[in-house]
Image (tube, coloured by chain):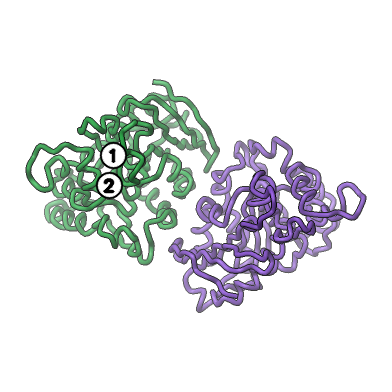
Chain colours: A green, B purple
Amino acid sequence: MSLEKVSANRVANGVLTKYKFPSTSLGLDTNVNVYVPDGADKSPVPVLFYLAGLTCTEDTGAQKGGLFNMAGKHRIALVFPDTSPRGAGVEGEDDDWQLGTGAGFYINANNPKWKHYNMYDLVAKELPDVLSKAGLGLDMSRLSITGHSMGGHGALSLYLKDPARFKSCSAFAPICNPSVVPWGQGAFSNYLVAKTKSSPPAEWLAHDASHLLAASQAEKLNILVDVGTDDQFLKAGQLTPEALEAAYEERKKSRKSDDFTLRRQEGYDHSYYFISTFSPEHVEFHAKYLNA
Amino acid sequence: MSLEKVSANRVANGVLTKYKFPSTSLGLDTNVNVYVPDGADKSPVPVLFYLAGLTCTEDTGAQKGGLFNMAGKHRIALVFPDTSPRGAGVEGEDDDWQLGTGAGFYINANNPKWKHYNMYDLVAKELPDVLSKAGLGLDMSRLSITGHSMGGHGALSLYLKDPARFKSCSAFAPICNPSVVPWGQGAFSNYLVAKTKSSPPAEWLAHDASHLLAASQAEKLNILVDVGTDDQFLKAGQLTPEALEAAYEERKKSRKSDDFTLRRQEGYDHSYYFISTFSPEHVEFHAKYLNA
């Protein structure tokens, strides 16, 4: 495994480096941006993954997310993966912004047509492994995850699938219940071959944050979610935070120790202006657990 | 004068609105992004102009500059003008990223070929006038200015031409001495018809921050400048902060009350990663004077 350095920019008392490497999960080269605060070589730092939304790349959150200064203050590394394989060669993968390129949905496709689309393995397994072995001073035993929209679905679903791996999870305007909304249905019906006859199929529910939260046996969950009330995709029924809230209402009857907050932010929309307003608070939320 | 609302996004406890209007300075429509913190309608707020660099638009500083949260905290409005006329129809204006479209240099061209290129009038006169009359709650008697690269030249030169109009000035990686560096020479030799025979011509020096600082009769100047030591354009000799420092060294012999700071930031480059690292400090610098 060789990380090839593509570029480096100093930011927030650290360095943001773009690496390219041949991903075994994807069977293709992929890019990742990694911010490491100064001194990590001497004293390893915890890590926060940021998963971006539809149409984005590894650069979007880095350029517009406003995460660095607070991460630098708390000495937290940031990892910005890409949102899909690039150049997988699937017919039509560039035709629809909601499917294919830029729309990997952080799951492993089991439909042979989409064989390169294994963003779950890339983000949940390969990147933590590759980056922890790269000598960057990243302490992957202290890992948290956040994301926006499709990446909010990614953050919540990765966390709820394996909460022991992450200290905390947050999300901006996440797709909370993908198995029953158009974005999730469009992706899941293409990427996943479902053998179960139920509706939604069990193969879809396995990646659905609201379903995973309802089914979670985790002792304690640490989750912060923000959604703007003027979010055009909230209004279009793609985000459905009420599904996540309903799952949590049921769960909290028996799990009193969770740190679960879902906020509706008055007047904010789906854009990075919304994210950059609240991202410092999200980094602080994660810092509480990463630096505990 | 009618401001047409193009878009609006809530950010940092305020609203960023993109307006389009027919500029009399340019003889063309132009766009401007204006961030107004909540409550300005009841209690008018001071204003900070941000002038962007070559190739940028009114969106660049807004999307990547990281200015909003600190501006919101101090209740300062932000104004992001475009960097040149658009669609002026000058032959070759789109051929060179250092001249023409995206490269207005915040001066008034007196070369008839570039008759629409009056970015000085737009930024220094028309925008403050139009925006103060728009009922947005902007108090243009409390106005400061900042900018990046070409926009750093713009901020410094507008300030030094008329320091009584501005409470303070700051700049990120500014072109400090445009009349003797390639970027400035390329722009000034095209936009300005020089009648003086001196070298550089007086018509160029009139827009040169280092020259203006040396000649300034202002009682007190408030200036903060940051330049990264790994800035590729610093290394290429386009920025020459030493010229601004030399002018200040001479001036400070007689003017002890200036608030003048020029910092070299180790390892930072010319990118928005550099700007977003230090922009909160710049906003705080301006807040000190705008809210005094």
Residue at left offset 84%, top offset 55%: B203
- Residue type marked 2: His
Residue at left offset 19%, top offset 48%: A179
- The reply to whether dot 1 and dot 2 touch (C-beta < 8 Å) is yes
Q: Around disc 1, counting alpha carbons within 10 Å, would you say few (fewer than 14), some (14 to 19), or many (20 or more)?
A: many
Q: Residue furthest top?
A: A1
Q: Is residue B63 left or right of residue A292?
A: right
**Residue A237 visible somewhere in the drawing:** yes
Measured as percent of width and height from the top left, residue B121 is found at 71, 65
Q: Chain of mark 1?
A: A
Q: Are marks 1 and 2 on the same chain?
A: yes
Residue at left offset 91%, top offset 54%: B196
- Residue type marked 1: Tyr
Q: Residue furthest left?
A: A197
Measured as percent of width and height from the top left, residue B13 is found at 44, 65
Circle 1 sits on which residue?
A106
Judge whether B37 appears above or below A201 on screen: below
Find numbered disc 1 in the image and state the secondary structure of the residue it sits on: loop
**C-alpha gap between disc 1 and disc 2:** 8 Å
Residue B168, label in figure: none
**Residue A292 visible somewhere in the drawing:** no
Circle 2 sits on which residue?
A153
- Closest to the observer: A228 or A97? A97
Q: Is residue B111 left or right of residue B236?
A: right
Q: Which of the two labelled residues, at mark 1 and mark 2, occupies the earlier sequence position? A: 1
Q: Quadrant of residue B123?
A: bottom right
Judge whether A212 appears above or below A142 on screen: below
Measured as percent of width and height from the top left, residue A166 is found at 28, 39
